[in-house]
Image (cartoon, grey):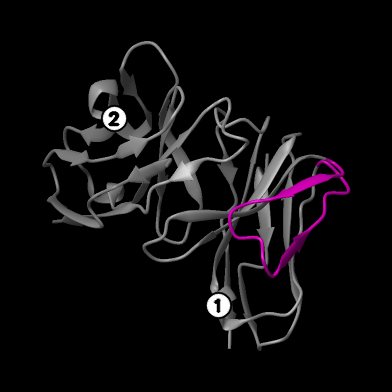
């Protein structure tokens, strides 16, 4: 039972490069989300999805794209990386998308943009 | 405005001593309250949650939290900390009407003195 799997764990990019952070879950969860974690700021929601084909913006969506073609996968795309996107990124999922559901988190992806 | 405040950025406690981490929230509807723990280099894991009923809730690893509606607080406690409790602790609030978003505190880093 893998839970939520994120790849890569570490990535260094140059300004302007693009990349995709992968997230996969094997729990048949409807809800998936991406957060970024910055020191002293807690977790901020980037994008989320309540099911295949359905995505929506969170608190800090600018500079990021997502898609949800399957229940299992929810990749996060950085189209043109900026130093402000240096952060630790977490993918999280839950059975349903209400604020009452417990989130299962991946181990995180640390991104550095030079 | 909806918010979660964790007043202490860092707390240092001696091994074997008791612990209390503070969490205050502002939320317009019935709150669903969570404490998550993040060990170094790891994702977040649920410690405990409060939805309704008994205001003193028990969690994993010997932690408990008490919901006090009159004080808008949900403080986390442990009678005797172990070195393995060194981690960052996050309080979050959500609800059935929260539009899929949890509101997160900035976190409290717990340091254990030997």
| Residue A106 percent across, percent down from the top left | 60, 51
* Residue drawn at 20 percent across, 42 percent down: B81
Q: Which mark is residue B94?
A: none
User: What secondary structure predominates along the stretch shown in magenta?
Assistant: loop
Report whether A48 appears left or right of B41.
right
- Location of the C terminus of chain A by quadrant is bottom right
Q: CA distance from mark 2 to mark 1?
A: 34 Å
Check the image and report above or below for B48 versus A15: above
- How many numbered marks, from 0 up? 2
* Residue drawn at 57 percent across, 33 percent down: B98
Is any atom of residue A21 visible in this view? yes
Report whether B35 appears left or right of B18.
right
Q: Quadrant of residue A62?
A: bottom right
Q: Which residue is mark 2?
A: B72
In the image, B76 versus A40, the foreground residue is: A40
- Element under label 2? loop
Q: Residues within 10 Å of mark 2 (few under 14, many from 20)?
A: some
Q: Is residue B67 highlighted in magenta?
A: no
Dot 2 falls on which chain? B
| Residue A15 percent across, percent down from the top left | 66, 88
Check the image and report above or below for B36 versus B70: below
- Element under label 1? helix
Q: Residues within 10 Å of mark 1 (few under 14, many from 20)?
A: few
Q: Is residue A61 highlighted in magenta?
A: yes
Q: Quadrant of residue A22?
A: bottom right
The span picked out in magenta is: A52-71
Q: Quadrant of residue B12?
A: bottom left
- Location of the N terminus of chain A by quadrant is top right
| Residue B71 percent across, percent down from the top left | 23, 28
Q: Which residue is mark 1?
A: A84
């Amino acid at each position: 039972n893998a839970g939520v799997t994120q790849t890569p764990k570490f990535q260094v990019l140059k300004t302007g490069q693009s990349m995709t952070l992968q997230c996969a879950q094997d729990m048949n969860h409807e809800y998936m989300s991406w957060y970024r974690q910055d020191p002293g700021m807690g977790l901020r929601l980037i994008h989320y999805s309540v099911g295949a084909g359905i995505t929506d913006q969170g608190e800090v969506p600018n500079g990021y794209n997502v898609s949800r073609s399957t229940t299992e996968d929810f990749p996060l795309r950085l189209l043109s990386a900026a130093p402000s996107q240096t952060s630790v990124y977490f993918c999280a999922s839950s059975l349903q998308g209400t604020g009452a559901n417990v989130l299962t988190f991946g181990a995180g992806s640390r991104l550095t943009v030079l | 405005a909806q918010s979660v405040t964790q007043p202490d950025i860092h707390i240092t406690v001696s091994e074997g001593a008791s612990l209390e981490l503070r969490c205050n929230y502002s939320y317009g509807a019935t709150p669903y309250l969570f404490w998550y723990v993040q060990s170094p280099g790891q994702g977040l894991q649920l410690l405990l949650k409060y939805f309704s009923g008994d205001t003193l809730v028990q969690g994993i690893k010997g932690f408990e939290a008490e919901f006090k509606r009159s004080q808008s607080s949900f403080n986390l406690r442990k009678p005797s900390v172990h070195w393995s409790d060194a981690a960052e602790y996050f309080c979050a609030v959500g609800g059935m009407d929260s539009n899929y978003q949890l509101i997160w505190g900035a976190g409290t880093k717990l340091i254990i003195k030997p």
